[in-house]
Image (cartoon, rainbow, N blue to C red):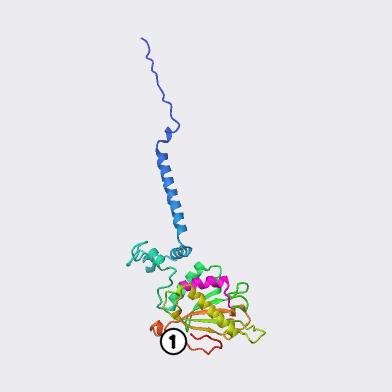
Amino acid sequence: MKPKIIIKKVRKKGHNDHHGGSWKVAYADFVTAMMAFFLLLWLITMVAPERRARVAAYFKEFNIFEKSGSSMFLNEQGGVTGEAGGAFGKMDKNFGKGITDMSNPETVGRSIRQQIAARLADVQDQVAVEVADDGLRIQLIDSEGRPLFKLGSSELSPNAVKILLVIAESIKSLDNRIAIEGHTDALSYASGRYTNWELSTERASAARKELEKNGLNPDRIYRVSGFAATEPLIKDNPGDPRNRRISIILLFPKDGGDHSEHEAPERAAVPGEPPV
């Protein structure tokens, strides 16, 4: 009896047989992720830097235990991109138009500080926002090496123009009447024909013009005044450059009445002050 001969044929494996089709799924996921990533980058470039900063500030302060944090999706909100609400929809609609809650100076001041921190990081040390007896006082303060005006002139520096733009966009949607004050240091001119009284008044008026140029309603201007060196910020050093400043005061009614009927606190008459 002859033995059986068994012939075993071994099929030669292809180069990619051991992978199966799983690589195609992984590759498709990779391409989808890359497409989403580049779409995100494109969307970010299409959004104004101010809005990106506002979104970043929102998530930085987000708190799930506070009502203000959850209100992004709740309480009459239309979702993230809804027209009527949604924090992003509302933020995009209102940013650049200023602050809409004018009920108290603390709230307005906090909003202005946030916008200054987001948009004026390099010069925010030259802007002071504080609640005072006469309202919310925003002060643009001169600094050694970073002047607001050219020496002895009412011509605004690039830094001053940049600061006034942000302030104008922050307050132009409010109804408060506004007082603008100019202040100088105690260094005087050699000639008596032109003094710090004229200089401080002209600088205040230059700030007014720049605010109006950036959308502030001229009818809101209540007073433009120059105080020379009579009210120094650094009282023990009248020659300190920080005494050179512009004060923009949002006048708030103390009795909760109409903003348009607010009477600003009386001040002494200032020589050279233009009629308002």
Place of residue 194 in the rendered image (x, y in percent of width and height, measured from the top left): 62, 85
The residue that label 1 is drawn on is 263
155 in magenta: yes
- From what the image shows, is residue 5 above or below residue 144? above
Place of residue 172 in the rendered image (x, y in percent of width and height, measured from the top left): 44, 74
| Residue 60 location, quadrant | bottom left
Query: Residue at coordinates 45% horizontally, 51% vertically from top-left?
Result: 38
Q: Seen in the image, is 235 located left or right of residue 178?
A: right
Q: In the displayed orientation, state which residue is furthest to the bottom.
A: 268
| Pointer 1 local density, CA inside 10 Å: few below 14, some 14–19, many at least 20 | some
Query: Residue at coordinates 56% horizontally, 87% vertically from top-left?
Result: 272
Q: Nearer the viewer, residue 121 or 217?
A: 217
| Residue 142 location, quadrant | bottom right
- From what the image shows, is residue 9 above or below residue 36? above
Quadrant showing the N terminus: top left
Place of residue 262 in the rendered image (x, y in percent of width and height, measured from the top left): 42, 85
- From what the image shows, is residue 112 above or below residue 89? below
- Tell me which segment is drawn in magenta: 154-169
Q: Amino acid at mark 1?
A: Glu
Query: Residue at coordinates 51% horizontally, 75% vertically from top-left?
Result: 210
129 in magenta: no
Q: Nearer the viewer, residue 58 or 163?
A: 163
